[in-house]
Image: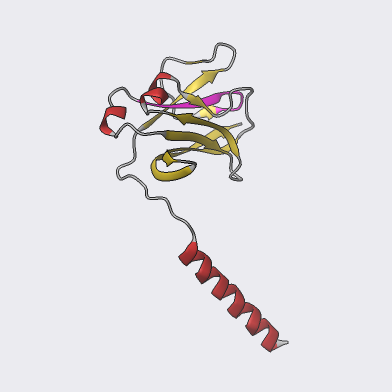
Amino acid sequence: MTVLGLIAVVVVLASTVVLAVSWPTTPQRFPALPIRLYAYDSATASIVDSPQERFRQGQIPAATIDEGVAGSVAAEPARASWYDAFGHRTNSVDLPDLDDLRASPVPLSATSAVPAGTYQFVLATVRGNRAEEVLAWVHVEIER
């Protein structure tokens, strides 16, 4: 029994090493682009006037960037995506240019309020259907 346990430990460790070495990575921009979060009103498809750091249940965060930030990055296609705590995508928008994110903030959900929890907003440049560089990654907590 001890031998089988030892073999299992070796297999798990070897699998972990192989996964760590072969896991695909996406380079991250340093420093990351500054993302602003606003409360989104799904009835009017617009955001409120001032940015927020905290959200409560029933509010829908929407992400955007400040004017002038997009000009600091080469004009290339990007993908703005929201994910829940389990890694499921809740909303994603392909952007021909970062100026489109400033003009049209991307909400966590365009259809309804989301439950309390932790969410992530990821902005990445894309080529084809593959993320090339993560430009920004923001965690958002929606409180009860």
Q: Quadrant of residue 104?
A: top left
Taking the image as shown, residue 100 lies to the left or right of residue 17, namely left
In the image, residue 62 lies in the stretch drawn in magenta: yes
Give the residue furthest to the front: 128
Q: Is residue 60 magenta?
A: yes
- Which residue is nearer to you in this view: 57 or 45? 45
Q: Is 140 on the left-hand or right-hand side of 86?
A: left
Task: Give the overall secondary structure of the magenta segment.
Answer: strand
Residue at 42% across / 14% down in the picture?
49
Locate residue 33, reporting x and y percent: 34, 36
The correct choice, above or below, for 85 with respect to 65 in the image is below
Please give the name of the residue rendered at 73% of the width and 87% of the height, measured from the top-left corner: 1
The reply to whether residue 92 is visible in this rendering is yes
Q: Position of residue 2 (x, y in %)?
A: 69, 87
Determine if residue 69 is in view: no
Residue 129 lies, with reference to residue 99, above or below; the image says below
Side of 90 relative to 105 (left or right)? right
Looking at the picture, the colour scheme in use is secondary structure
| Residue 60 locus on image (x, y percent) | 56, 25
Instruction: Tell me which corner region of the image, top left, top right, bottom left or bottom right, holds residue 143.
Output: top right
Magenta segment boundaries in residue numbering:
56-65
